[in-house]
Every structure is written in structure tokens, then in C-alpha cells.
Image (cartoon, helix red, strand yellow):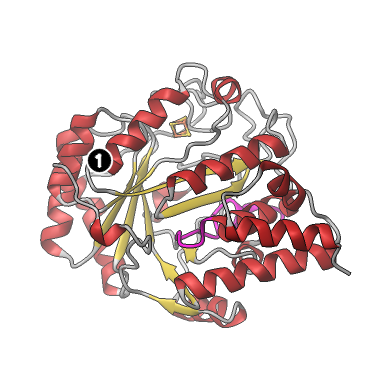
């Protein structure tokens, strides 16, 4: 039984700029019939705007060194127990080669901030682009415009930088030495340079409310990102948030679904964090409107050291396991580049 108020809210957020009250109503759903209806609507929107497919991206965690102190992250600089490594260019190229040999057309290079120099990353990007017909997504945090420019010129295609929260005070409570305005400025630089820009949030971080999530979804709607990553908060024992509960699964799935319905076009991962709760919930993420899986190609000896939260499941996946995941979700596996689907993407003029 679906309440008329829920149907009305769903209908309104599909046809106009989403009202905060409607977003809050939908994010708060817990009745199984109503959440199934919400998630099924999100899948229908995904299938219409992105086709019935899952994009696969090869994730390589190139360095666990970080100068920041995000309160939720096991790689924060105050965690003396964290293992720190930085992969050499050669090691990264070997991982890219393996991904390319399995048919992947996108690699995502991820690290904490300050693990490598600007020049060595630019060299690495150029080497990847010379050797492999593959798109390069970066997820390397906040950097000056000049760094983003150097990496774009070297051939990088995309950049992922989660906003984490659009609420200034809440943002500052999580990132004591950083500001929301800097993060927004970084996102503006990335867009200006012609990157396919991605963003996202964690769900269930202490201090976050339904209201702040609703505002974040309005931000996604206003800014139209090529990629949006949403995953549950998982507490790390060596952080100030160690004793806080993990993010609620249903709220995470509802956030994915509502974001999908509002923003329509983004590539949205069924995140590693969703696969690292008490069991693997990535299928539920796909059934709530997600459409990306990121198998982990970080070399085995480094995987466990990239511990942004405990028990991170760094699955490599096989063609068979991906096919199985796709079949179970009624989606085809797409090994192509899967570039931005935003309508304005093809007409935007990057400044370099
Ligand atoms: S979230 Fe990223 S920037 Fe923050 S401490 Fe962890 S690795 Fe560093």
C-alpha cells in the first residue's frame, strides 16, 4: 500500500527542482512496500537515462599517505597505526595492464592527499594514456588549480571529489583543518578544466540529518555531476568517530534511489562500503538505482593497507562474478569507457 503523499512527492521530484520536504519524506521511508516502490522507480529512471547496464571501472589505490585529518577516515594523519605505502609508476602500470587485459576501459587512481608529487602523477597519466586505450579517472583529493591543469594536460579524463556535506558547520566538524568553500572551489576548477566531475556523500556520519542529506541532493540537482558516489559511513577504530554506529543501510539505499530519481544521468557506484557491511549489499545498491561496479586492481600486498575503514572488501571480481552480478540485477555488464551521460557534456568547451 503506497500512501498518496508518497506518490505525490515522487511525482513532484521527477518533474521540477526537488523541494526539501519531498526529499525528506522519501528519504525517511521505511515501509517495505513504499521503499520497494521508491527503489523500483529509481531503477526505471536509471534504465531510461543510462540504459540497462552496469559500467565497470578498475580501481587502483596508488598511495595510503595523507596529510589530512578527516575524522571518519583510517588514513588520517594522526593514525600512527596506519600502514603507509606509495606505489611506483611501474607498479601502477602493471595493474593498469592487468585491467586492460581483462577488457576494462576505465581505471580509477585513488589516494590520500600528498602521496605523490604533481609531476610524477602527470607522468603516470601520460604513460597510461600512451600505452593503453583507457579512460583515467582520478580521486586524489583537493589540489591547486595548477595540479588539476597538469593532470588534465597529461590526459586525465575524470575526477571524483566527494562534497561529503553542503552544510558548512557539519563539514567543518568532519574536516577540522579544511573548509567547504575550498572544496567547492576545487569542484569549480575541475569543471572549468573540462574534467567529467564526480561527487558524493557518506550516509550516517554522526551529526548528519535527513535535512542535510536532502540539501546535499538539492546540491547534486543544481550542479549535475557525471558521477555520484553514495555509501554508508563505517567507523574506523583509530579515528575520533570510532565508537559511533555505522550508517543505516536503508537510509543509504533511499539516498541512492532519491538521488538517482532527481539527477537521472550520473554513473553511481554500488560502493565498496556497501559491500563491506555485515554482508555484501552492492546488489541492493544496484536495485536502488546504482549502475557502476569498481573491481579492485590494487596489488594484493597493498590492498589491506588502504584501510579508510575496517574490513574493507577489496574484491577483484572475475568476468564470471561480474556477469552473475549483472544477471541478478537484470543489467548488462558494459566494459566500455562509459563517459558522462549528461546532455550538456558533449557541448561543453573545456578551458585548458
Ligand atoms: S578521507 Fe581522504 S583526504 Fe581525508 S584523511 Fe582519508 S585519505 Fe586523507
Q: Is residue 112 magenta?
A: no
Question: Residue 339 lies in what quarter of the image?
Answer: bottom left
Ligand 1 placement by image quarter? top left
Residue drawn 64% across and 31% down?
A: 237
Q: Nearer the viewer, residue 343 or 94?
A: 343
Q: Picture quarter containing residue 144? A: top left
- Left or right of 141? Residue 312 is right
Looking at the image, can residue 279 be seen?
no
Quadrant placement of the N terminus: bottom right
Q: Quadrant of residue 161?
A: top left
Residue at left 19%, top 51%?
Answer: 349
Q: Which residue is mark 1?
A: 192
Magenta residue span:
263-280
* Residue 193 at x, y percent in the picture: 22, 42
| x and y percentages locating residue 205 in the rendered image | 66, 35
In this picture, is 279 found above or below 40?
A: above
Q: Residue at x 50, y 59 (%)?
A: 269
Residue found farthest to the right: 1
Q: Is residue 214 above or below residue 14?
A: above
Q: Is the stretch drawn in magenta largely helix, strand or loop? A: loop
Q: Residue at x 29, y 40 (%)?
A: 190
Measured as percent of width and height from the top left, residue 98 is found at 29, 67
Amino acid at each position: 500500500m503506497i500512501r498518496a503523499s508518497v506518490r505525490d512527492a515522487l511525482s513532484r521530484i521527477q518533474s521540477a527542482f526537488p523541494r526539501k520536504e519531498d526529499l525528506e519524506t522519501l528519504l525517511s521511508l521505511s515501509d517495505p512496500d513504499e521503499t520497494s516502490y521508491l527503489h523500483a522507480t529509481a531503477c526505471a529512471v536509471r534504465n531510461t537515462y543510462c540504459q540497462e547496464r552496469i559500467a565497470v571501472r578498475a580501481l587502483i589505490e596508488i598511495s595510503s599517505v595523507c596529510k589530512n585529518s578527516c575524522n571518519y577516515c583510517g588514513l588520517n594523519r594522526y593514525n600512527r597505526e596506519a600502514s603507509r605505502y606509495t606505489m611506483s609508476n611501474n607498479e601502477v602500470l602493471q595493474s593498469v595492464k592487468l585491467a586492460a587485459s581483462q577488457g576494462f576501459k576505465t581505471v580509477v587512481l585513488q589516494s590520500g592527499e600528498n602521496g605523490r608529487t604533481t609531476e610524477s602523477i602527470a607522468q603516470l597519466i601520460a604513460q597510461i594514456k600512451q600505452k593503453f586505450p583507457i579512460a583515467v579517472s582520478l580521486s586524489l583529493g583537493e589540489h591547486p588549480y595548477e595540479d588539476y591543469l597538469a593532470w588534465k594536460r597529461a590526459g586525465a579524463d575524470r575526477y571524483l571529489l566527494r562534497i561529503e556535506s553542503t552544510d558548512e558547520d557539519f563539514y567543518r566538524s568532519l574536516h577540522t583543518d579544511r573548509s567547504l568553500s575550498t572544496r567547492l572551489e576545487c569542484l569549480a576548477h575541475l569543471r572549468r578544466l573540462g574534467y567529467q566531475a564526480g561527487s558524493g556523500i557518506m550516509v550516517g556520519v554522526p551529526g548528519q540529518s535527513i535535512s542535510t542529506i536532502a540539501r546535499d541532493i538539492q546540491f547534486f540537482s543544481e550542479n549535475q555531476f557525471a558521477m555520484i558516489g553514495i555509501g554508508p559511513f563505517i567507523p574506523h577504530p583509530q579515528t575520533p568517530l570510532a565508537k559511533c554506529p555505522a550508517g543505516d543501510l536503508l537510509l543509504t539505499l533511499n539516498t541512492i534511489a532519491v538521488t538517482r530519481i532527481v539527477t537521472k544521468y550520473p554513473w553511481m557506484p554500488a560502493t565498496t562500503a556497501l559491500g563491506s557491511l555485515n554482508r555484501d549489499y552492492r546488489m541492493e545498491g544496484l536495485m536502488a538505482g546504482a549502475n557502476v561496479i569498481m573491481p579492485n586492481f590494487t596489488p594484493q600486498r597493498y590492498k589491506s593497507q588502504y584501510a579508510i575503514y575496517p574490513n574493507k572488501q577489496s574484491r577483484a571480481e572475475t568476468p564470471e562474478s561480474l556477469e552473475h552480478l549483472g544477471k541478478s540485477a537484470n543489467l548488462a555488464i558494459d566494459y566500455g569507457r562509459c563517459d558522462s551521460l549528461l546532455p550538456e557534456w558533449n557541448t561543453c568547451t573545456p578551458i585548458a
